[in-house]
Image (cartoon, rainbow, N blue to C red):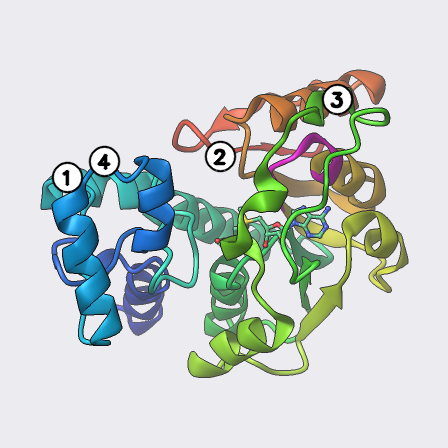
Amino acid sequence: MVTDTKTLYLELLKKTLSDYLNVDNPYANGVPPQFWWKKNGFKNQRNKWLVKLLRRSKIIVLRDDGLSAKERQEKREKGLDWPLMQAQTMIGIKRLNNIHELLEDLIDRGIEGDVIETGVWRGGASIFMRAVLKANVITDKKVWVCDSFEGLPLPEPDKYPADKGDAHHTFNFCAISKETVAANFEKYGLLDDQVCFVKGYFEDTLAHIPAEKFCLLRLDGDMYSSTIVALEELYPKLSSGGYIIIDDFNLGPCAEAVNDYRKTNDITAPITDVDGSGAYWRKD
Ligand SMILES: C[S@@+](CC[C@H](N)C(=O)[O-])C[C@H]1O[C@@H](n2cnc3c(N)ncnc32)[C@H](O)[C@@H]1O
């Protein structure tokens, strides 16, 4: 049985950041109606009007994902849903566990350098990184929080053919302002001078981050372009013995960027799967 307060704090944080505690609550929103209406082609007319009425009344919005609490729980564990209404992170418990394990291991082995996430959405995974550092009283590592804070970029198929037709830039719910993300850090009491925000598209910003070394890179930019730029700019600064996490290794364009980069740079370190989406390797 876990009794130490550090572990108890971090375990609870995973559940709150990912909104895991609300999966069995039918009144906690899964996907906001304007999203699933489009997705489902306005099939469910009865619920459409019910939800519209409830939304207008500003009382409540029912879930309408057709899933049992257990199915929702499994999806949230693996971060396979869009927890748009309340979560601070869309990654699930398993990928938060992965951050936890790797960061504790890096701290134990004294690997030099800061931690960085490229693609933060509402900030939850980065907030968790800051929490792990704080819970271990680590004061010499910063958390770099990198995002456009305006959503994903347009695909540039001439430059990155793998991104042709990519629709991520149309997902308005990915555009979360820097102020909102900072406020989320503040809510958890984790906004301080060890947290550094880097605003802008990766190709304009990552090369200029004033950090000499990283112990942990966490890439979560979904697209080929966002992944390859982060690899090119940040991997050379990853300390030997450090880890790189790829959140979207299940997405074709992202995996292609990773495979291209590894091939070009003769990287043969084995890749470990986390939950069927995320994956990581340790730099030799
Ligand atoms: C899937 S979300 C990240 C999820 C987040 N890590 C979490 O814990 O929930 C992708 C994020 O990457 C950002 N992003 C993707 N490509 C980008 C780029 N080229 N430059 C800046 N931000 C980018 C988007 O704005 C979005 O916030």
Q: Report the disc number at residue 262.
A: 3
Q: Is the C-beta of the residue carrying label 4 under 8 Å from the nearest atom of ligand 1?
A: no
**Structural distance between the alpha carbons of marks 3 and 4:** 44 Å
The mark closer to the camera, 4 or 2, is: 4
Say whether residue 220 is visible.
no
Looking at the rendered structure, the secondary structure element under dot 4 is loop
What type is the residue that disc 4 sits on? Lys
Looking at the rendered structure, the secondary structure element under dot 3 is helix
Count all numbered tags in the image, as a single digit. 4
Q: Which label's residue is closer to the chain start, 4 or 2?
A: 4
**Structural distance between the alpha carbons of marks 3 and 2:** 17 Å
Q: Quadrant of residue 39?
A: top left
Which residue is rendered at x = 25% and y = 59% of the image? 29
Pick the residue in front: 113 or 221: 221
Q: Which label's residue is closer to the chain start, 3 or 4?
A: 4
**Structural distance between the alpha carbons of marks 1 and 3:** 41 Å
Is 281 within the magenta?
A: no
Mark 4 lies on residue: 43
**Structural distance between the alpha carbons of marks 1 and 4:** 13 Å
Mark 2 lies on residue: 278
The mark closer to the camera, 1 or 4, is: 4
Callout 3 crowding tier (Cα within 10 Å): few <14, some 14–19, many ≥20: some
Which residue is rendered at x = 37% and y = 42% of the image? 38
Q: In which quarter of the image is residue 121?
A: bottom right
Looking at the rendered structure, the secondary structure element under dot 2 is loop
What type is the residue that disc 1 sits on? Gly
- Location of residue 16 in the rendering, given as x and y in whole percent from the top left corner: 31, 65
Q: Quadrant of the C terminus?
A: top right
Which residue is rendered at x = 66% and y = 76% of the image? 194
**Structural distance between the alpha carbons of marks 4 and 2:** 33 Å
The part of the chain drawn in magenta is: 219-226
